[in-house]
Image (tube, helix red, strand yellow):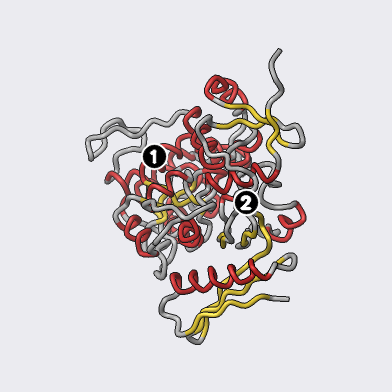
């Protein structure tokens, strides 16, 4: 008789997640390695990944990511869940072909509105225009309208953004820099026009192969133990149960307290539930809160409703004893950088002092030019 799977409680899952997410202790890891370990960082807004890396890495320098983006070793592109992520260049190549199905399904929902449009021709023209030079959405819409004056230019531009892998090019996305969001194609940005699925790139190498099996294994390495529903929530893809079934000989099987089946990598860290967890500041849109169907291991449902707004904003949070305990934001004006902490519940004095100390370090790293730094708690 096969023994029942071991049960992992909420704290056990919490500590495993923090360890995988590099939040149980700061790691001496190059930023590009961290970005790849995390399978990208959601980047709806340009700045959150910088805060996320600062909270995860020892001696993180905010200029490092900008240098990676300028050197085209890291970039911002739509991948998991059809959302903008900061990923390595090689992960952009590896992930986008799998997540393209999400964006293709978006286009199918508008099939009636695109009836009669030769979408392949529109995409080919957009590819040419964006290869000529990076362009804003407005610039692309204007140029498409000249070629297809009788069609909805906004809808055509949206379809192009779904169909083509587009890179949001620097200076957009670089800490402290400003600039309009301009896009070019991934193949133009990395290879001067070599198609994404071409086997001969300018650097002489082949695009890295990443199977669905590999994708699930990488997810578990960064977010496990997890259910099939969890990996589908993270990726935005469906029908991954058959992938997990195929991987079963390579996985451990657990249950959570509600009887859900969880899967994990044999060698992945699963710390003791009572291992201390330091206070941490988690930025807006961080995948820590977005990558499980059941988020109880990190945040309660009542808290989630306060953090996730109706217009798609996911607010920045802070962790006490490993769990979400409230929200925070930085305000900078008149030479002062202030970090305001909004707890959901009273914070014990020891953790309050740790948050203040951590907050002052964050302000010094993120805004060294400010004349004063201040951390304050709301009531």
Q: Residue at x 60, y 36 (%)?
A: 225
Residue 107 visible in the snapshot? no
Which one is in front, 139 or 310? 310
The crowd level at tag 2 (other Cα within 10 Å; few <14, some 14-19, many 20+) is many
- 330 vs 37, left or right, is right
Q: Is residue 162 above or below residue 228?
A: below
Residue 20 visible in the snapshot? yes
Which one is in front, 164 or 330? 330
Q: Residue furthest top?
A: 1
What percent of the width, then of the height, locates residue 351? 64, 66
What percent of the width, then of the height, locates residue 122? 45, 44
Which one is in front, 44 or 274? 274
Query: What label sits on residue 225 in the rendered view?
Result: none
> In this figure, which residue is indicated by the disc labeled 1?
93
> In this figure, which residue is indicated by the disc labeled 2?
289
Q: Is residue 359 above or below residue 127?
A: below
What percent of the width, then of the height, locates residue 23? 53, 53
The span from disc 1 to disc 2 (Cα, nearest Å) is 25 Å
Q: Secondary structure at mark 1?
A: helix
Q: Quadrant of the C terminus?
A: bottom right
Counting residues from the start of the chain, the first of labels 1 and 2 encountered is 1
- 277 vs 74, left or right, is right
Q: Is residue 91 above or below residue 152?
A: above
Q: Quadrant of the N terminus?
A: top right
């Amino acid at each position: 008789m096969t023994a029942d799977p071991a049960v992992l409680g909420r704290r056990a899952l919490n500590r495993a997640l923090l360890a995988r997410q590099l939040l149980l202790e700061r790691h001496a890891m190059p930023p590009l390695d961290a970005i790849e370990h995390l399978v990208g960082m959601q980047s709806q807004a340009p700045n959150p990944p910088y805060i996320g890396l600062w909270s995860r890495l020892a001696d993180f320098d905010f200029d490092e990511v900008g240098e990676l983006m300028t050197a085209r070793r890291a970039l911002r592109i739509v991948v998991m869940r059809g959302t903008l992520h900061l990923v390595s260049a090689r992960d952009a190549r590896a992930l986008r072909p799998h997540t393209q199905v999400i964006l293709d399904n978006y286009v199918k929902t508008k099939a009636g509105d695109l009836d009669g449009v030769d979408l392949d021709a529109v995409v080919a023209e957009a590819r040419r225009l964006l290869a000529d030079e990076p362009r804003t959405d407005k610039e692309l819409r204007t140029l498409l309208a000249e070629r297809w004056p009788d069609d909805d230019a906004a809808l055509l531009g949206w379809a192009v953004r779904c169909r083509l892998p587009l890179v949001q090019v620097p200076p957009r996305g670089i800490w402290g820099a400003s600039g309009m969001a301009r896009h070019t194609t991934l193949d133009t940005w990395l290879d001067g026009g070599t198609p994404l699925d071409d086997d001969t790139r300018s650097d002489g190498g082949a695009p890295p192969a990443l199977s669905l099996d590999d994708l699930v294994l990488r997810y578990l390495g960064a977010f496990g133990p997890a259910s099939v529903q969890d990996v589908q929530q993270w990726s935005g893809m469906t029908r991954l149960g058959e992938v997990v079934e195929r991987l079963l000989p390579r996985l451990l099987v657990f249950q959570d307290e509600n009887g859900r089946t969880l899967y994990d990598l044999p060698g992945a860290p699963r710390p003791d539930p009572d291992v201390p967890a330091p206070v941490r500041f988690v930025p807006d849109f961080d995948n820590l809160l977005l990558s499980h169907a059941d988020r109880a291991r990190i945040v309660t449902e009542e808290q989630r409703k306060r953090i996730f707004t109706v217009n798609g904003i996911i607010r920045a949070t802070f962790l006490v004893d490993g769990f979400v305990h409230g929200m925070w934001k930085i305000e900078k004006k008149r030479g002062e950088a202030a970090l305001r902490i909004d707890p959901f519940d009273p914070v014990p004095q020891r953790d309050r002092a740790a948050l203040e100390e951590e907050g002052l370090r964050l302000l010094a790293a993120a805004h060294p030019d400010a004349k004063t730094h201040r951390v304050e708690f709301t009531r």
